[in-house]
Image (tube, rainbow, N blue to C red):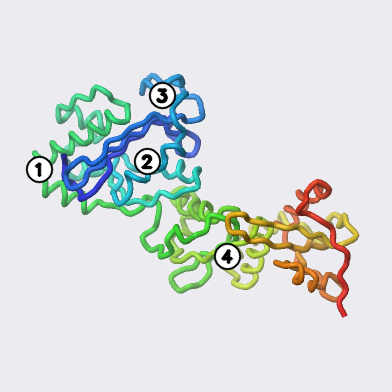
Amino acid sequence: MPTMLPCYVMLDLETTGGSATHDRITEIAMVRVENGAVTARWSSLVNPGQPIPPFIESLTGISDAMVAEAPRFVEVLPQVKTLLQGAVLVAHNVRFDHGFLAHEMERAGDLLNVQTLCTVRLSRKLYPQHKSHGLDAISQRHGLHNEARHRAMGDVDAVLAWLAIAERELGADAVQAAAQSMLQGNAFLPAHLQTPLSEIPDGPGAYVLRDAQGQAIYVGKAAHMRQRVLKHLQSAKTVAKDRELTAQTVTIECHPTAGELGALIEKARLVEQLQPAHNRLLKRERTTLQFTLDTLPAWPLDTPLAIREYHAASERSAVHVFDQWRWQGSATSTSELAELDLNPVRSGLRPFDLDIFRVLQKRLPTLRHDPHVFALQEVHHG
């Protein structure tokens, strides 16, 4: 077996189409190689949860009937993670396979954080005299016969066979040197990012992207912070704003909250305090969408409104108080709630925030049916 790297997993996926965002995996095959010896060989059909298009069925031979009783990806995820542990992910056009794996793992609430190696690029480096480096072209050029083309394990075996031929033709040292020089970090994580994704909570909150000087460049909020940060990084190649943010971001600071409203409030507080450049730019772009204060609908209650949030995983809880469409304060205990001065004459009204207004507009119609929403009688102090 090729000793290209000390430990790698040769992987191939069959899918319902070419979009990692919209399409899903139908088959997965993995061969783990350690110091030139196969230590694991595994494959499985995967139920994609969506119909397989006729063209894909004719190409792969995988039908809806074949995957009907197959496990969903989340069921095979433990095996995938075990095989990838401590290994380099290798595939022919690795961006395709990595993209599908990353999206499937994100849907399952997990992360794909591996080094990658693309054997298409490796073939170009080893055989620059040839123009085409697709699997069919490589197989034809080297006399490989793949009886299971476009099935996951068949294609894995074909790439492994090609690597063995390359080592015989060019020498194992040459193949190893080329592979080491092309070894990539995580396919979407920038090398300058110092904050491990594992340290970003996968719960609600606000987050601050900081540059190399520690300056805040952007404040965001999310119901799932880790997933939102991943989207920034994964979209860097196609979305100009995310590309600029990713290029500047060195550290990520997280502020967990008990829910969506807490995240909005914390984001507004951080934006006001830090004045990050990208948020100021976004605010200017949104000025035409802002409500003017004299056109706001009337506050529909005679008292302030309190909304309780609770996040089970972190056990965080908070009660947020609003009046006249504005946030007036938050409390994490009954005593803190009693101490809030809710008299707008004395305490004044906080600045209007459009995002908070929109959330409140959605929640207020369900006031009578939501046990977490309740009206507060005015609390007088002194």
> Where residue 117 sits: x, y (%)?
28, 47
| Circle nearer the viewer, 1 or 4 | 4
> Where residue 231 sits: x, y (%)?
50, 51
Residue 175 appears left or right of 242: left
- Which residue is farthest bottom? 382
Q: Tell me the SS state at disc 3.
A: helix
Q: Nearer the viewer, residue 241 or 171?
A: 171
The amino acid marked with disc number 3 is Ile
Q: Which of the marked residues, 4 or 2, is nearer the chain's N terminus?
A: 2
Q: Which mark is residue 354?
A: none
Q: Tell me the SS state at disc 2.
A: helix
Q: Which mark is residue 56?
A: 3
Q: Residues within 10 Å of mark 3 (few under 14, many from 20)?
A: some
Q: Residue at x 52, y 58 (%)?
A: 201
Q: Which residue is mark 1?
A: 170
Q: Which of the marked residues, 4 or 3, is nearer the chain's N terminus?
A: 3
Q: CA distance from mark 4 to mark 3?
A: 44 Å
Q: Residues within 10 Å of mark 2 (few under 14, many from 20)?
A: few
Q: Residue at x 79, y 60 (%)?
A: 306
The amino acid marked with disc number 1 is Leu
Q: Which residue is mark 4?
A: 255
- Which residue is farthest right? 302
Compared with 350, 301 (above or below) is above
Whether residue 120 is visible, yes or no, is no
